[in-house]
Amino acid sequence: MSELNLNEDQQDCLQEIINVAMGQASDQLARFLDTFVYLKVPSIEQVSTLSLIETLSNNENSAAVVSQGFFGYEGIRGEALLVYKPKDSDRLADLLGYEPDELSVEEQIIDLSSILTTTFLNVFAKQIDNQMSYSAPRLLAGSQSAVSDHLAQQSFNWDLALKVKITYQVTDYSFNCDMILFIPELAINNIKAVIDRILEEF
Amino acid sequence: MSFSVLVCDDSNMARKQVLRSLPEQLSANAQLAKNGQEAVELLRSQQFDILFLDLTMPVLDGLGVLQTLKDENITPAIFVISADIQPEMQNKVLELGAKAFMRKPVQLDILNTNLKNHGFL
Amino acid sequence: MSPNDICTDITNKINTGILIIDNQYNIVFWNRYLEIHANKKTDDVVGHNLFQVFPELPQKWLKRKVESVFQLKSQSFCSWEQRHHLFELPHTRPISTNSHFMAQNCTFLPLERKDGSDNVCILIEDVTDVCHYQTMLNKTLEELAQANRIDGLTQIFNRKHWEECLEKEFSRARRYQHGLALIMFDLDHFKLLNDTYGHLGGDLVLIETARVISSLLRLGDLFGRYGGEEFAIILPNTDIVGALDVAERIRVAISKNVINFQESEIKVTASVGVAVISEDDNRYEDLISNTDLALYDAKASGRNIVCVAKQLVET
């Protein structure tokens, strides 16, 4: 299994790129929701896909998982998973400002996920001189078995994943979700090269 | 005329980014702080003319620093440089006494304009 | 051919609908695919308002969707799984599918025009086949799941599914501070009945009892076969007075029910235990064992009787 093996400077640089991406994503989310989004320092963690599948299949608390593929230049591609807890997914309608009967919870959760994923990755890509395209987001069935089945298929040759824990607090609502980016080895090496390029400039 | 500068950010890269963007006479003797608490302690013990301040930080965040300095009547010129660019946040820091708000990653021309506007260049 | 000609050619031949609107929701462009499927004239479409040309569109929802694309400059999607279709277009499988309109996956793309104005491009894909097969698959899976929940003999919930229901109702009652009652009953001297009339007779009694009791219950009550000749009912939002009323009606209904089997008339009675959720119940199993103890009391007190869980009698 390959590893990211980021040294302190590289880790710091990646964290800063993600902070900036997160900041702009929150700004766009806040404008879209017409509210204020309180931002916490996002934590970044490298996880092995194997352990992640175990975590997700053991985690009885994950209510919904939305998957969306992304692809950019230079082999940077992957799959973003947004994992929600039940108590948070219940609040989505309030958060998104929809009337209760206007659209289903599934649709709301897919909409929000798509906004979070695409705004975050757009800014992320811009900072590393890249540009992203996306596939349609899909709600993987809420049950845990379906999620782990999906992961077992998808992560076949993807050893590593980058887990970005996002905590959004939206005015009165504390709203948490985990964004997990599955990134294949080639893309990870490429991101590392870009980080080194940025660091050299300093 | 020379000014004393403090750069406060939890990210090493962000601190370097600010230092690199500053003109030589400001960056040469600049001091660094890794979080809000460190910055406040430095500001209590010595006089600084300019503070570059990040918002999202561990231990004590940027808003906490602004509030503390206001309460203790410590008055460097504060320039906030943050990834959290929501208009509400920008208003909040200006209300708490910051001279200007700049988005990350900091842009050289914007930084210089702000320094000029406040008589540091 | 110039790249521009190639693009125009593809746009007109592709099996995907392309519709471009400006920020006033006026239609700027549509391709041949849409022209054919929507059966409208280009003159009546291009330059006109989207919602006037396609009045079937969910205006409020779509505006919010398009707004997000304009504002966030990021693509957005709408899958048939959430909305079967946006545009009322016919499909090419009128015989093999039962839906009236083409099932659609729509993509909303932000476009920045050369003159600096913003447009949104809506791509419309026909996924009627996907929708058809997925719907059939879901139906089959649902039937399988249903079969997994039902007791084959009595056609009420089996024990496994009934317990899962109780677990959910228990945590819901806890969370929202609602009442929750449990009734368990057991047919008296069932072994003797089996010995007298044979297993076919016994089975008929179980089937008939389940049928009679089902007709007594409210829609939200959850009725299951707990095991052998023991049955159990979850009564959400019910206090002890309501539960006792139901329990007594169950006891009477069973005792009055005459079951015709071959040349005989079979009569049975039941012993009934009742409990409601209390502060001391940490898990749903605690509620079951309280009810079970009440049922045991009913058996011990001579059968054909309703007993309430002890802690309720004392308070």
Image: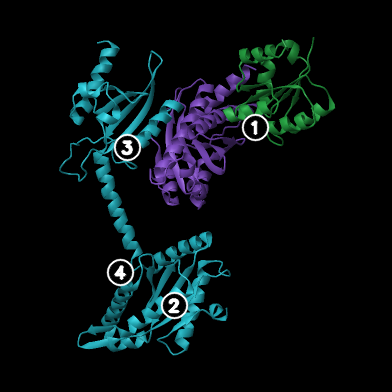
Write down the residue under mark 3: C58
Q: Nearer the viewer, mark 1 or mark 2?
A: 2
Write down the residue under mark 4: C155
Q: Earlier in the sequence, mark 2 or mark 4?
A: 4
Q: Front-most of A143 and B104?
A: B104
Colour chain B is painted in: green
Task: Tell me the SS state at disc 2.
Answer: helix
Colour chain A is painted in: purple
Q: Earlier in the sequence, mark 3 or mark 4?
A: 3
Q: Nearer the viewer, mark 1 or mark 4?
A: 1
Measured in 3D between alpha carbons, the distance from the residue under mark 3 to the one under mark 2, in whole angstroms, is: 50 Å
Q: Quadrant of residue C80?
A: top left
Residue C31, which numbered label?
A: none
Amino acid type, mark 3: Pro
Measured in 3D between alpha carbons, the distance from the residue under mark 3 to the one under mark 4, in whole angstroms, is: 42 Å
Rate crowding at label 4 as few (under 14), some (14 to 19) or many (20 or more) other CA atoms within 10 Å.
Answer: some
